[in-house]
Amino acid sequence: MPRRYNTDVSWDDPFERVQDQRGAKRSHLHMQITIIVSDEVTRGRLVGPGLVRDISQTGLLVVTKHRLQPGQQVTLSLPTNLCSQTMCLPPAFVGPAEVLRVSSGSKDRTMVALQFGDSLQANMEFALFVESLQRMALVASA
């Protein structure tokens, strides 16, 4: 009698994820960015720093004092002063991002995973900028 189920087939068990399944390569990098958050109470904007821990073509991981929630929309400003002046980049890339994850850090700081918005991800200059940051991080770690 033939077997009804092929028990030798590999399958994706969501409870046994052992490897990182992110599609974009991340590079460890330390740089300061600006995070702009809409404040519902004052109907203004809160502007503060974020310290980048790693970056990929689709997002980044930052440490910040902002109190952010998953799903929240923020605006990022990433300065380009770390890159060569010959790249002819704007002084900063400014665009939207979505908060994916928040985890508590030390003291009053939190680790926040942010996904770049479509306007940044579709920008070829921004992609080249991130790629150059990744190359710099690779050289620094060697």
Image (tube, rainbow, N blue to C red):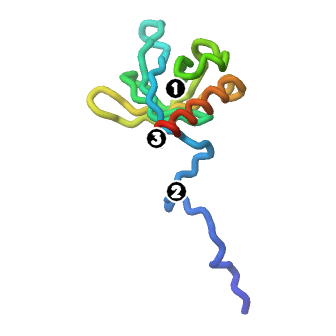
- Sequence-wise, the earlier of marks 1 and 3 is 1
- C-alpha separation, residue under disc 1 versus residue under disc 3: 33 Å
Disc 2: which residue: 19
* Residue 66 in view, yes or no: yes
Q: Quadrant of the N terminus?
A: bottom right
The amino acid on which the numbered mark 3 sits, given as a three-letter code, is Ser
Residue that extends furthest to the left in the rendered view of this protein: 107
Of pointers 3 and 2, the one earlier in the residue sequence: 2
- The amino acid on which the numbered mark 2 sits, given as a three-letter code, is Gln
Identify the element where label 2 is drawn: loop
Query: Which residue is found at the position 37% from the left and 30% from the top?
Result: 110
Q: Measure the C-alpha gap from mark 3 to mark 2.
A: 22 Å
Mark 1 near mark 3, Cβ–Cβ under 8 Å?
no
SS assignment at label 3? helix
The image position of residue 121, as x and y in percent, is 67, 29
Which class describes the residues within 10 Å of circle 2: few (<14), some (14-19), or many (20+)? few
Tell me the residue that label 3 is attached to: 141
* Residue 72 numbered tag: 1
- Indicate left or right for 105 with 17 as reference: left
At a point 62% along the width and 34% down the height, the residue shown is 57
Instruction: Measure the C-alpha gap from mark 1 to mark 2.
Output: 27 Å
75 vs 69: above or below: above
Q: Looking at the picture, how far across and down is residue 14, in whole percent? A: 54, 58
In this rendering, the label closer to the viewer, 3 or 2:
3
Q: Secondary structure at mark 1?
A: loop
Between residues 48 and 9, which one lies in front from this camera angle? 48
